[in-house]
Image (cartoon, rainbow, N blue to C red):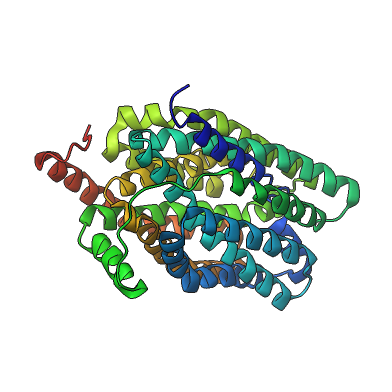
Amino acid sequence: MAAGDNRIRRFYLFRAATSFALWMPFWTLWAYENLDDLFLIAVVDAAFWATMIGLQIPAGLIGDKYGRKAALVLGEVLFALGVLTFGLSTEFWQYVVSNMIWATGVCFMVSGDTPFVYDTLVELKRENEFTVVMLTATVVMFAGNAAACAIGGFIVEWSGRLDLPLIIASLIALVGSLTVFMLKEPKVERKREFSYTAHFGVGLKQVITSKAIVILILFQIVIEIGIYVMAFFRSIYMNEDLSLGYLEIGILFASFLAVAAIVIRMARRIEGVLGEKRSLVFMYGVILISFVIVFLVRHPVAIMTQYPIYLVAGIQAPIISGYINRRVDSEHRSTVMAIAAFTFTSLLVVIEVGFGYMASAWGLVESIMAMTLMTIPLAVFLLLQWSKEVDRERERGAGVDAI
């Protein structure tokens, strides 16, 4: 057994224990059942992301100062509390408050998760394995969620209650959070700036002075907004537009995740064959084609488009985070990832509320297509700039694969 293998396996166990999301197919349906308005549920979700705008960077700074485990423990507990209160909510403001608690937990989870893995691998002198480890962790997460979605479908079918998966899942998440204590804090030397402001300033400078990091952050935002908008409205699309029942929705969600868990194991090979330039083109192309089919095909067979969307959802974070992490020093890794998340959430708050308004006025599928068309010019521009930047790094002897 290679040195450090047990530490990586413990992280996989942590991911499995905290990834049993019974609520995944039903949380938006639960809010929609009580609010009956696409715009209002978009505003509810925007409260989640608005909270992340205010707390993501402080959470990243805390993760850099007090360690990755501290961020993960706090994040998991708040996450479980947020899921529970969401399941107990029935009014607009109750959903808003519960989503703010939920978001606070996610802020700390994001700030501790990938930096914990990367710093652990740096300590073990195995940082070149980051993408493989994160892809495996994603497979574990998807497999756990696949089982949870199927079970959640049976729970709703049996009980007739859309809130029950949320309540049960929150208790499971709370117990699962105890697995954080099995993890060992990575011993990687991180220089401490005089103050949070100084530390943030250095992290921000690393972002704005690196064209490659700016491009990667913006491109990931384009991908993630498309993925997230579909994820948020997917259950409503399946139930309202495709007339699928709750049990069918739960089982289909399970199948999406199961197929993605199998296919994303090939992501390392795909990335290796395509290289940094074409990997990004591949991900955007898959999302673009899938969304066009959703618009053109108004039949239950269109549900097949969700499989490739889930594939990209699974591979984009490990691949793009790996590209970013290799260009950032350890002492600012959490802060830089927090800046990336802050930029994403800031844009998503505006885009999601606008999308909810369009969906109420024009229809869900029509709004998805409109959003897709709006992303094309920016995506093409970023892909062209990324291609040039990878070539420049190769010329400077940066050792970046530019296949």
* Residue 269 percent coordinates (x, y): 38, 26
Q: How many marks?
A: 0
Q: Is residue 204 left or right of residue 229?
A: left
Tell me if I can see residue 171 in this picture: yes
Tell me if I can see residue 300 in this picture: no
Q: Is residue 242 left or right of residue 3?
A: right
Tell me where residue 283 sits by quadrant: top left
Q: 320 or 298, which lies in front?
A: 320
Tell me where residue 151 sits by quadrant: top right
* Residue 30 percent coordinates (x, y): 75, 61
What's the residue at 52%, 53% (across, down)? Answer: 69
Check the image and name the residue furthest to the left. 395
In the rendered image, the quadrant that contains the C terminus is top left
Check the image and name the residue furthest to the top. 1
What's the residue at 44%, 55% (across, down)? Answer: 372
Q: Is residue 393 left or right of residue 97?
A: left
Q: 62 or 343, which lies in front?
A: 62
* Residue 199 percent coordinates (x, y): 32, 68
What's the residue at 70%, 51% (across, down)? Answer: 173
Check the image and name the residue furthest to the bottom. 93
Up-down relation of residue 290 to residue 213 (above or below): above
Q: 93 or 398, which lies in front?
A: 398
* Residue 169 percent coordinates (x, y): 74, 51
Q: Is residue 44 left or right of residue 148?
A: left
